[in-house]
Amino acid sequence: MKYIVLLFWSAVLFTLLNYVTSAIGNTPFNMDQVKQGLIFSVVFAVFVVIVGAILPKGEAQDIDSHRQ
């Protein structure tokens, strides 16, 4: 379920980003930009899943606790 939500929100945010940048650049917002945003959102979602798998689980340790 969390992966579906991740894909949904990344698609929404990338589509919004494409819309805002096309409005600033005074270019028409068309389906090519929507497709490009969806591709970027899938790549971003996969990147987030990979980073989440690589990072260690648990709380961060204090750096000074190792020096005694």
Image: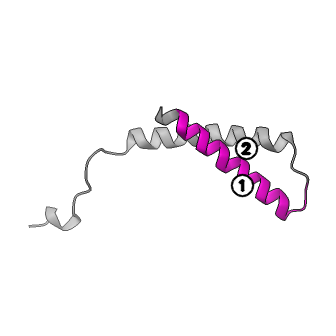
Q: Which residue is mark 1?
A: 17
Task: Say what amino acid the circle numbered 2 marks.
Answer: Gly
Q: Residue at (31%, 45%) from the top-left corner?
A: 56
Label 1 with label 2: CB-CB less than 8 Å:
yes
Q: Which region of the structure is painted magenta?
A: 4-27
Quarter-of-image position of residue 63: bottom left
| Residue 68 on image: x %, y % | 8, 67
Is 48 in the magenta? no
1 relative to 35 in the view: left or right: left
| Residue 45 on image: x %, y % | 56, 40
Badge 1 or badge 2: first in the primary sequence = 1
Which numbered tag is attached to residue 65? none
Local crowd at mark 1 within 10 Å, few (<14), some, or many (≥20)? few
Between the C-alphas of marks 1 and 2, the distance is: 8 Å
Is 7 in the magenta? yes
Local crowd at mark 2 within 10 Å, few (<14), some, or many (≥20)? many
Quarter-of-image position of residue 32: top right
| Residue 16 on image: x %, y % | 72, 52
Q: Nearer the viewer, residue 26 or 67?
A: 26
